Amino acid sequence: MGAFQVWVERAVVQAPIRAFMQTAWGWPAVESVHFLGLTLLFGSIVVWDLRLLGMARSVPIAAFHRLVPLAVIGFAINVLSGSMFVMAEANQYIYNPAFQLKLLLLALAGVNVLVFYVTVFRRAARMEPGSPPPSGARLIGAISIALWMGVIICGRLITFYRPVVCMPGEPIGFVADCIIR
């Protein structure tokens, strides 16, 4: 992963977004947008997942499925705003274990959604109100909540696990600061 990290860091150094993010209002504005996207995303997903776990059984699962577009909008907002953070301070993200774990959890959440739609969605969507969700749907709902909470926690931990500034162009500094420490 090291070569990819160095490439990303070098590619975004001159990005216009980086200049915007370094203004007085750039970072706070994007942080606020990121939080709004997170609210849309997690708010929609957690309600959906709680229904998959068996709560609010009087409401059909298909009715909760109407929240999916809000989750997709929230996810898109977070991808765009999160990319701006990475472009602004690439070396503080790409070398950061909390950020790397966040990306892994995002990928696993995506796989979890895919598994849901491929395996149990049709059966769950046809259920009558009041009936318990299939066990596979309950498992996927629980995994989803855990993964998304992990994404949020890792996002918060990024600030606390700032890596040392690595100098990929200087081999001695890179080895001393990035590999040995």
Image (tube, rainbow, N blue to C red):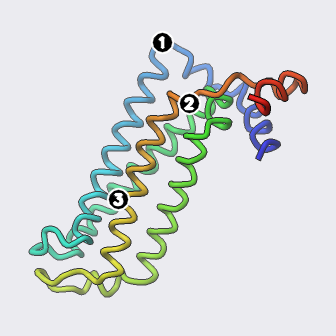
Q: Quadrant of residue 138?
A: bottom left
110 lies left or right of 96: left
Quadrant in the picture for residue 54: bottom left
Rendered-image quadrant of the C terminus? top right
> Looking at the picture, which amino acid does disc 2 mark?
Tyr
Residue in the picture at 53% in, 14% down: 23
Image coordinates of residue 152 in percent, x first then y, are 41, 44
Q: Earlier in the sequence, mark 1 or mark 3?
A: 1
| Mark 2, residue position | 161
Task: Name the residue located 37 percent from the left edge and 83 percent from the top edge.
Answer: 120
Question: In the rendered view, would you say 70 is above or below 177?
Answer: below
Q: CA distance from mark 1 to mark 2?
A: 23 Å
Marks 3 and 2, how far apart in space?
Answer: 24 Å
Q: Residue at x 24, y 75 (%)?
A: 62
Residue 91, percent from left and from top: 68, 29
N-term mark: 3 or 2: 3
Residue 24: assigned label: 1
Label 3: which secondary element? helix
Q: Nearer the viewer, mark 1 or mark 2?
A: 2
Task: Check disc 3 and report the residue beneath it.
Answer: 145
Q: How many labels were placed on the picture?
A: 3
- Which label sits in the foreground, 1 or 3? 3
Numbered disc in front, either 3 or 2: 2
Residue type at mark 1 is Ala
130 in relation to 167, above or below? below
In-front residue for pair 139/58: 139
Label 1 and label 3: CA atoms lie apart by: 35 Å
